[in-house]
Amino acid sequence: MDPILWIPIGFITIGFIILIFAKKSMESKLAFIKANKESDESAKKAKFIVWWIYGTTAWGVVSIILIVWFFNTFV
């Protein structure tokens, strides 16, 4: 098995694990924002959630590119 094969597998697997653990944190931050709409801290948490969404989207795009690259190279 080619060692280059492990790059997309590892990237996607580690990304899923991080997303699963970060999901609970995002849910608690969202609940805090809903409860305290006027707080300065809720604005900071909202900005963090937006950046988390951007990061998740970027991870998804890179994962798709790696899957396409894998099929073009190995299949």
Image: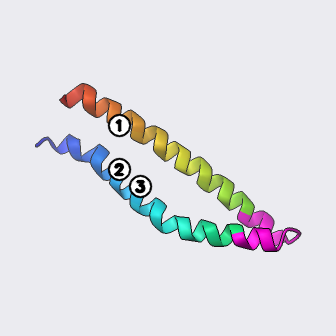
- Point out the stretch of residues depicted in magenta: 31-45
Q: Earlier in the sequence, mark 3 or mark 1?
A: 3
Q: Nearer the viewer, residue 23 or 47?
A: 23
For mark 1, what is the residue?
66
Identified at 19% across, 30% down, the residue is 74
Report the number of numbered marks: 3
Task: For mark 3, give the secondary structure.
Answer: helix
Q: Is residue 47 above or below residue 57?
A: below
The image quarter containing residue 48 is: bottom right
How many other residues sit within 10 Å of disc 2, few (<14), some (14-19) or many (≥20)? Answer: some
Residue 58 is marked as: none
For mark 2, what is the residue?
11
Q: Residue 66's spot in the image, x, y percent?
A: 35, 37
Query: Is 34 placed left or right of 71 in the picture?
Result: right
Which residue appears farthest toward the right when viewing the image? 38
Identified at 27% across, 33% down, the residue is 70
Does the magenta segment cover residue 41?
A: yes
Residue 15 is marked as: 3
Identified at 68% across, 53% down, the residue is 50
The image quarter containing residue 13 is: bottom left
For the stretch drawn in magenta, what is the main secondary structure? helix
* Contact, mark 2 vs mark 3 (Cβ under 8 Å): yes
Q: Is residue 67 above or below residue 11?
A: above
Q: Residue 5's spot in the image, x, y percent?
A: 21, 42
How many other residues sit within 10 Å of disc 3, few (<14), some (14-19) or many (≥20)? Answer: some
Q: Nearer the viewer, residue 26 or 2?
A: 26
Query: Is 4 placed left or right of 53 in the picture?
Result: left
CA gap between label 1 and label 2 equals 9 Å
Task: For mark 1, give the secondary structure.
Answer: helix
* Contact, mark 1 vs mark 2 (Cβ under 8 Å): yes
Does the magenta segment cover residue 42?
A: yes
